[in-house]
């Protein structure tokens, strides 16, 4: 197996580093040219042939190719380059918090990263896109080359296989997605009357799902009217204030309630008003912590009540399911890593053999122009032509021998 000792990874991830501390180890500039400049300086300083830079909210990764005899960069010096104003304490901690991988370990890290096995949330596909973008960017900035290209090609193929052929990315983990699943399981009509109470980030996300599933009979109530409007507009409506709930006569089938209020918002008297005489069963989805729904409403037999605890329980079950898929993913990855190793070995041989034709050609030229020059000059034209023809034939045949032999060694 080809050891690939030129490949090294220096990384800070959620596994060993507090997420808010990761920002200390990223390049301290949002300006693209400044980033490229720093990465090029790292290349020069640490004798690096290729570098790829990935920065996400829970990891930063420097993937490098160096000559196999070059020492792995000293972490303190490295961090000092990318963050010159870092404190002495953070610099000291960099050694403890960093993860450094070389050769086979580095390959395995990249494959696990691309297929989200190393993610904070196993199975999240976002890392796959982020890794591809990081590679595209590093390539466009001419920071990396052929080695990174080959590694990324195989790591991306492996990730596609893992996402397609295991359940690692299946089963939703976000409470909003799970709440919508629960709602959809009850098969609501497309014209179901839906009330969103609260217009923060959570109900904003709920509204996106509602639009996706083409529910448009949606009213939005919120303490501040501007935020209510921002969501209601998407349904071609105007937002309403929380106090408007007391006068709302449009009826409802489903309520999503999610505010940061510590008071119950949906209580028995309000429910009665909102029902407006309608006695059919209703769905109330309460995503707030603490709950925004009074206990007497939750307990009613004509109310299907879904709260965040049930959804969180489901989310952790789903996460367990995804984790159980990790072992299947690892088996697939092992196969892809083997295929990558063979391709890499072949590529190395091809590169090494690139000089063979020129070397053999030079031998032939030297033989004609120097070593056997006098002998050739003494020959008649026909003999000389035949000798040169034989040498050209030998050259052609000899070129393919080492290439064939090397390829046979790999297969
Ligand atoms: N479901 C989840 O996954 C999840 C995740 C995180 C948090 N939460 C919980 O969900 C609730 C809201 O989360 P969020 O992500 O939407 O937060 P957010 O973006 O901060 O929005 C807060 C919402 O609550 C409203 N609000 C705040 N204080 C209020 C009060 N005293 N009376 C009435 N309304 C009030 C705000 O109205 P204004 O626009 O007027 O400020 C806004 O609509 C919180 O209980 C939070 O703990 C849920």
Image: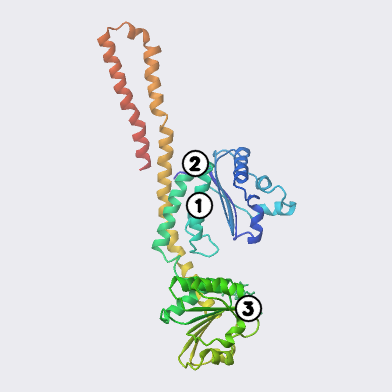
* Above or below 293: residue 89: above
Question: Which numbered disc flags the more N-terminal residue, 2 or 3?
Answer: 2
Q: Mark 2 = which residue?
A: 145
Q: Residue furthest top?
A: 378
Q: Residue 250, can we see it? A: yes
Mark 1 residue crowding within 10 angstroms, few (<14) / some (14–19) / many (20+): some
Tell me where residue 204 appears, x and y as whole percent: 55, 71
Task: Residue 312 in the image: state x and y as whole percent.
Answer: 54, 76
Callout 3 secondary element: loop
Question: Which mark, by number, is residue 181?
Answer: none
- Read off the residue under disc 1: 133
Which residue is farthest left? 382
Give the foreground label among 3 and 1: 3
Q: CA distance from mark 2 to mark 3?
A: 54 Å
Q: Nearer the viewer, mark 1 or mark 2?
A: 1
Give the quadrant of ligand 1. Answer: bottom right
Q: What x and y, as percent, mark residue 42? A: 62, 42
Across and down, in percent, residue 350 comes to: 40, 36
Dot placed on the residue nearer the N-terminal end, 1 or 2? 1
Q: Which picture quadrant has residue 351?
A: top left
Q: Please give the label number shown on residue 223.
A: 3
């Amino acid at each position: 197996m080809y050891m690939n000792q030129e490949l090294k990874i220096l990384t800070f991830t959620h596994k060993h580093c507090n997420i808010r501390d990761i920002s200390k180890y990223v390049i301290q500039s949002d300006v693209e040219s400044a980033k490229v400049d720093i990465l090029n300086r790292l290349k020069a300083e640490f004798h690096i042939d290729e570098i790829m830079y990935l920065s996400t909210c829970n990891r930063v990764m420097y993937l490098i190719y160096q000559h196999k005899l070059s020492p792995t960069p000293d972490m303190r010096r490295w961090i000092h380059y990318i963050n010159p104003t870092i404190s002495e304490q953070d610099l000291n901690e960099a050694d403890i918090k960093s993860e450094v991988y070389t050769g086979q370990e580095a390959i395995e890290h990249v494959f696990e990263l691309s297929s989200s096995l190393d993610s904070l949330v196993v199975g999240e596909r976002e890392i796959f896109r982020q890794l591809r973008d990081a590679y595209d960017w590093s390539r466009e900035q001419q920071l990396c080359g052929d080695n990174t290209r080959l590694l990324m090609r195989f790591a991306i193929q492996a990730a596609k296989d893992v996402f397609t052929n295991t359940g690692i990315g299946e089963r939703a983990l976000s409470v909003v997605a799970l709440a919508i699943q629960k709602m959809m399981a009850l098969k609501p009509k497309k014209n179901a009357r839906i009330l969103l109470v609260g217009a923060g980030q959570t109900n904003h996300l709920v509204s996106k799902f509602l639009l996706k599933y083409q529910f448009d009979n949606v009213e939005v109530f919120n303490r501040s009217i501007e935020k209510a409007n921002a969501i209601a507009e998407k349904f071609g409506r105007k937002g309403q204030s929380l106090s408007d709930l007391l006068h709302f006569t449009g009826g409802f089938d489903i309520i999503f309630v999610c505010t940061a209020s510590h008071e119950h918002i949906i209580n028995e008297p309000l429910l009665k008003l909102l029902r407006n005489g309608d006695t059919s069963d209703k769905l109330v989805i309460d995503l707030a912590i603490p709950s925004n729904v009074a206990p007497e409403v939750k307990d009613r037999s004509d109310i299907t009540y879904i709260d965040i605890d049930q959804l969180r329980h489901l989310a952790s079950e789903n996460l367990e399911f995804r984790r159980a898929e990790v072992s299947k993913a690892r088996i697939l990855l092992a196969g892809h890593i083997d295929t990558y190793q063979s391709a890499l070995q072949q590529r190395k041989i091809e590169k090494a053999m690139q000089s063979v034709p020129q070397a053999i050609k030079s031998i032939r030229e030297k033989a004609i122009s120097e070593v056997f020059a006098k002998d050739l000059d003494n020959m008649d034209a026909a003999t000389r032509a035949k000798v040169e023809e034989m040498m050209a034939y030998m050259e052609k045949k000899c070129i393919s021998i080492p290439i064939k032999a090397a390829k046979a060694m790999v297969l």
